[in-house]
Image: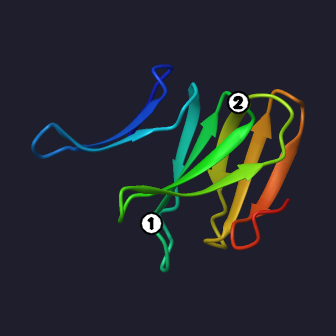
């Protein structure tokens, strides 16, 4: 997976060295995180430059949800290692937020 200031996220097939999925997230991408222990979802969390965290569904190729709450660019995303629904984000506003993605509130 790669994210870019060209406002896209790409998922690559390492065997064929080809792009498997491409998402237009609408703003600069500062970070990506995939939940490797997830049993019920295949979400990719994307830290965006416009105060959003985009949750992209790699199974369907679509946008699942957007998390709003930061007051500046989101610079970091990291999934919990003990709960597949908990996501931590850090932003330029100096805050760290913990999200339960089932409720989309901090």
- x%, y% of residue 40? 49, 79
Residue 23 is drawn in which quadrant? top left
Q: At 52% across and 61% down in the image, what residue appears? A: 35
Q: Which one is closest to the eye, mark 1 or mark 2?
A: 2
Q: Residue furthest left?
A: 16
Residue 42: image tag: 1
Q: Is 61 situated left or right of 79 in this image? A: left
- x%, y% of residue 21? 29, 46
Query: Circle 2 sits in a helix, a strand or a loop, which is it?
Result: loop
Q: Is 4 situated left or right of 28 in this image? A: left
Q: Residue furthest top?
A: 5
What crowding class fits label 2: few (fewer than 14 Cα within 10 Å), some (14-19), or many (20 or more)?
some
Above-or-below relation of 42 to 74:
below
- Reading the image, the residue beneath label 2 is 50
- x%, y% of residue 88? 74, 52
Above-or-below relation of 2 to 81:
above
Q: Is 36 situated left or right of 52 in this image? A: left
Above-or-below relation of 91 to 45:
above
């Amino acid at each position: 997976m790669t994210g870019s200031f060209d406002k896209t996220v790409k998922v690559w097939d390492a065997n064929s060295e080809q792009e498997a999925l491409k998402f237009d997230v609408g703003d600069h991408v500062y970070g990506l995180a995939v939940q490797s222990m997830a049993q019920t979802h295949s979400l990719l969390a994307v830290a965006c430059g416009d105060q959003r965290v985009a949750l992209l569904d790699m199974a369907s190729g679509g946008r699942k949800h957007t998390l709003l709450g930061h007051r500046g660019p989101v610079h970091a995303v990291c999934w919990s290692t003990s709960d597949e629904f908990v996501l931590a984000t850090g932003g330029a506003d100096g805050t760290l937020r913990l999200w339960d993605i089932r409720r989309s509130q901090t």
